[in-house]
Amino acid sequence: MRLTAQIRRTMAPADPAEGCVVDRQRADADLQQILSTSRVLSPQPVRSVGLRRRPFRLAVAGAAITAAVIGAVVFGFGTGGSSTSAYAATPPPLRYSPASAATPAAELLEQIERRATQGQPSSPSSAGVRIHWKSWSLFTREDTGGEAESNLVPQDYVVTAQEDGTGTEQQTTQGQTETHPLGRSRMGGAVPGDPGAFRAWLQSRSNVSLSDPKGAAQAAGDLLQRQVLGPQQRAALLHVIGELPGLTFDGKVVDRAGRHGEAFSATSAGSGLPTLYTFIVDPASGQVLGVEETLTKTAGKLNVKIPAVINYRTYLSASPAG
């Protein structure tokens, strides 16, 4: 009803019958005559009509126009993803195999750190990089009437960067590909391998708190989308994740690219809604395979059903450009 009233107010200036005075008795009589006429009328020359008859015709036309607009808008909202529509088709949550032991999450990450760095060089080649990742995000917009519309946006990225940071980013969204030149990144330059130095380096290049799961996920994403990390740097990133408050081990998982990993999660309300941030890690190499964001308690004005995966990033490959 609120939407119907709003549309009627909006369309009032366009109603040709606005302000007309209707002779209700004559109008009712004309309507009964029309409804009782069964024969088909042949075309007749246009004749002038009295002023008493014209208001009724205009009123009917105006009502028909208003009804058609209201119907189009109401049904349009029903299929366009408003708060009255069906839930948006978010990706299904990943399935985790339960952990067999009650080892703390931070300790499990330390074990991965040690495995990843044994017998490996401390840093990758700096001759340039090629990085490929995919993301899926739920974008929601709200109109002035408070109606929310959610859209699912999958995107594919390929970054090719030289040692000095220059290069290109190829972005594909819904089948459309665009290539943009890369600007200087705050995540450029040599990345420390020592955990303490790495944390200070990453914090100096991030406008977020690394002690908050949301901030850690954002900083990790910014880094992984511009740098090829060696074993020491990967281990240092895992050390930052291992220090997140409330971190839990969810178990083994197959990610959205079909790779086997282990999942570690922590919750933050930094986005305005309680959100579970999950880091999927390759247990052999220490590489962060992906980061997922899941609403677990409430969706606010988003048209999604709890639990709802509202964003994930899958890091597919990162190698020297050669």
Image: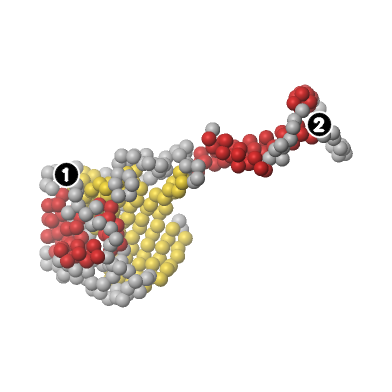
At a point 13% along the width and 48% down the height, the residue shown is 104
Q: Read off the residue under disc 2.
A: 52
Decide which of tag 1 and tag 2 comes sooner along the chain.
Answer: 2
Residue at mark 1:
99
Q: Give the image location of residue 49, x and y in percent.
A: 85, 35
Q: Which residue type does callout 1 highlight?
A: Ala
Using the image, determine if residue 165 lies above or below residue 74: below
Is 19 situated above or below 149?
above
User: Residue 167: x, y in percent?
Assistant: 36, 72
Image quarter of the C terminus: bottom left
Q: Residues within 10 Å of mark 2 (few under 14, many from 20)?
A: few
Q: Quadrant of the N terminus?
A: top right
Q: 294 above or below 207?
A: above
Judging from the image, what secondary structure is the residue with disc 1 in? loop
What colour scheme governs how the chains and residues are painted in the rendered image of this protein? secondary structure
Name the residue rendered at 76%, 34% in the picture.
55
Residue at 11% x, 64% y is 118
**The image quarter in which residue 155 lies:** bottom left
Picture quadrant of residue 190: bottom left
**In the depicted structure, whether residue 232 falls above or below residue 279:** below
Q: Amino acid at mark 2?
A: Arg
Give me the disc on residue 221: none
Q: Mark 2 falls on what kind of element?
A: loop
Separation (CA) of disc 1 from disc 2: 83 Å
Q: Nearer the viewer, residue 124 or 295?
A: 295
Residue at the location (12% across, 52% down)? 107
Task: Look at discs 1 and 2 and give the one toward the viewer.
Answer: 2
Side (left or right) of 138 relative to 215: right
Percent across and percent down for residue 38 are 79, 25
How far across and down, in percent of the image, does residue 307 sit? 32, 41
Q: Specify whether residue 213 is in view.
A: yes
Tag 1 and tag 2, C-beta contact below 8 Å: no
